[in-house]
Amino acid sequence: MSKSLKSKKKLNTYLLLVVLIIAVTLGFLLAKREAEFAPEEKIKISGVWVNNFLKEKNLQKDYITLIQNENYHIFFIPSQEEFTISITSSPFEEQKKKAEEEFIKILGIDKVSSCKLKVGITTPSFVNPENAGVIYKLSFCK
């Protein structure tokens, strides 16, 4: 083998080693950065960091209520990582908009991030018969 070929192989080995070291270092730094932006007050659901609404909640239930009032009930089903917003008063569209705003406020996220979550919006037929029987998405998600 020529001296030139040996030098090229050695150089390629060194370059590969340098690239691996850089990749491992970047991976470590990115993981550390993600942890810095995810304090104990945040939890990750479907890849989205949200306010920890599970604090001091009974996790033995099939669902966890985030908020419930006379207009809507917003809850989370841990086994499915899914949120449900049930509109319990009229007019449907007005209450739906208020509930959506409250939902992103409670979770401490923006509209774009909320679209990455599994969210279904429903209403009972005795409250909004014309809107019942359909599972709606968040109005600002495509």
Image: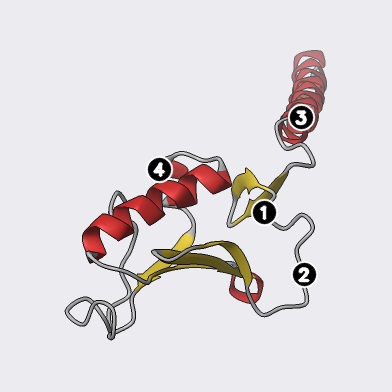
Closer to the eye: label 2 or 3: 2
For the residues labelled 4 and 3, the Cα–Cα distance comes to: 23 Å
Q: Tag 1: residue type? A: Phe
Q: Residues within 10 Å of mark 3 (few under 14, many from 20)?
A: few
Residues tagged 1 and 2 counted as in contact (Cβ below 8 A): no
Q: Which residue is mark 1?
A: 53
Q: Which residue is mark 4?
A: 111
Q: Which mark is residue 58?
A: 2
* SS at circle 3: helix
Q: CA distance from mark 2 to mark 3?
A: 27 Å
**Residues at marks 4 and 3 touching, judged by CB atoms closer than 8 Å:** no
Give the camera-side residue of 71 and 77: 71
Q: Amino acid at mark 4?
A: Lys
- Whichever of callouts 1 and 2 sits on the residue coming sooner in the sequence is 1
On the image, numbered disc 3 is attached to which residue? 36
Locate the C terminus and report the quarter of the image it occupies: bottom left
User: From mark 1 to mark 4, how far is it between C-alphas?
Assistant: 18 Å
Q: Earlier in the sequence, mark 4 or mark 2?
A: 2
Left or right: 130, with 24 as reference point: left
The mark that comes first in sequence, 4 or 3, is 3
Say whether disc 2 or disc 3 marks the residue closer to the N-terminus: 3
Q: Is residue 139 above or below residue 132?
A: above
The structure residue drawn at horizontal position 46% and vertical position 53%, both measured from the top left corner, is: 116
